[in-house]
Amino acid sequence: MSATNEQAFAGHSIALTLNGQTRQVDVQPWTTLLDLLREQLDLVGTKKGCDHGQCGACTVLRDGKRINACLTLAIMCDGAELTTIEGLADGDTLHPMQQAFIKHDAFQCGYCTPGQICSAVGLANEGRASTDDEVKELMSGNLCRCGAYSNIRAAVVEVLPSMNAAPDQGGRGQ
Amino acid sequence: MNPFSYSKPSDIAQAVNLAGPASRFIAGGTNLLDLMKENIARPEHLIDITGLPLKDVRATDSGGVMIGALVSNADLAWHPLIERDYPLLSQAILAGASPQLRNMASTGGNLLQRTRCYYFYDSTVPCNKREPGTGCPAKDGLNRIHAILGASDACVATHPSDMCVALAALEARVHVQGRAGARVIEFADFHRLPGDAPQRDNQLADDELITAVELPAPRFQQHSHYLKIRDRASYAFALISVAAAVELDGDVIRDVRIALGGVAHKPWRDTAVEQSLKGQPVSRENFVAAADAMLRDAQPLAHNAFKIKLARRAIVRALSDATLGGTV
């Protein structure tokens, strides 16, 4: 790599509000948000499944909207407000969606669960689903290879009415 | 992913001045980053256009709607103007991708999606679209998902978008800007058939940026339907999709648009067939005749002959659902 290229490819400093805290981090242009979270910031709750936007295990909330962290460049999140699974609980009090997943036994191996929960919080923020069928369609971006879908839907359907009444940006202090 | 440099211009002129053969614009990144991870796309420079003022949906003086290129697929599908006046477009967008991807993907980027042909995505095999002149393994390979209309010896790939099928039916116009200035491209002319240059999906020059997609005044909001048929109930690309839009005068067809997805290198329309339906009464016989006419030149490959039958039935069903709630 030439000196010019080294300069062009240098890290960039970006500012994030991550789970309610302001963070300044250096990223390479090609670092995905998923790799930033897991490899640089040790927030390993967000999972890498397919790494191609097909499984939803990496779902996080950006400005309250659910996105795939694997297909998002970290550098393009400068100034964004991000919430990961680590940011949903309020201290020791679980987020209602987390509580519902436990109540309904909405997982087996648990690998897809952080993405499922973040996606379900994003779904609630959108306010477009209330029935089982609507939840089924609008949670289709999150695969569960254990096949816990029926319990996942039960958990989500139970929590939606209370969240639709009070949309949640997802995360403490927000 | 290859290393690349990055810039984020704040105005359109700056963005197009930065553009060139080795650079790519990025907005949602849902397709581009995937292609970069597979080493199919290897840009040296990414131009982040998310800071450009292209995020509005606004009514035009001619009664239509101007959709900024950066409006997300989700925001567009659920925009009150679009839900009310262009339900076909809302339906098509919501039939595509997943909620996460629709939150990320932009209007302009949706038009620029590349094919999901498995061979295009596999950098270990030849592909005329990826490496011009190397050959097409799909033509004699696994081609269940491939084209039945408008294909060439060089390429049998299909265009993957649902949104674009509705935009074709609605006769949208694509506003673009390059260093030489701005121009407007009719939707039917925006995407290309593969011919002997399948590496080119559309008519854009390297320095041209999509700034907006314009819809003409609504005429089909009472009678339209987007039917998508795929291998699973949700979150899969179309095997066949049909955007049907009809303007009725009693039970007589005053105007009709039929656009097909999953069948060709671009959303497929046949204006002669549409013309032949005008003035005809709504009937199953007329819909079947139109479907047969649309597919008269269809050419099956080894594994996709089923698509011709499926398309025929899907056209009839979509027209029926659009006009008489499926009772035809």
Image (cartoon, coloured by chain):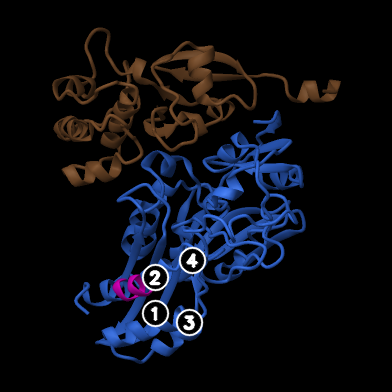
Chain colours: A brown, B blue
Question: The disc labelled 1 sits on which kind of residue?
Answer: Ala
Q: Which mark is residue B263?
A: 4
First-in-chain label (2 vs 4): 4
Do the CB atoms of the residues marked 2 and 4 lie less than 8 Å apart? Answer: yes
Q: Which SS type dominates the magenta stretch?
A: helix
At x 41%, y 82%, the residue is: B292
The answer to whether tags 2 and 4 share a subunit is: yes
Question: The disc labelled 2 sits on which kind of residue?
Answer: Ala
Q: Which mark is residue B291?
A: 1
First-in-chain label (3 vs 2): 3
Q: Is residue B9 left or right of residue B142?
A: right
Identify the residue position indicated by label 3 in the image.
B296
Mark 4 Cα-neighbour bin, 10 Å: few <14, some 14–19, many ≥20: many
Chain containing the residue with disc 2? B
Relative height, residue B214 to residue B35 (above, below): below
First-in-chain label (1 vs 3): 1
Which span is picked out in magenta?
B312-317
- Which residue is the extreme one toward the bottom? B279
Based on the picture, tell me whether residue B263 belongs to the magenta stretch: no
Mark 1 Cα-neighbour bin, 10 Å: few <14, some 14–19, many ≥20: many
Q: Helix, strand, or loop for circle 3?
A: loop
The CA span between labels 1 and 4 is: 13 Å
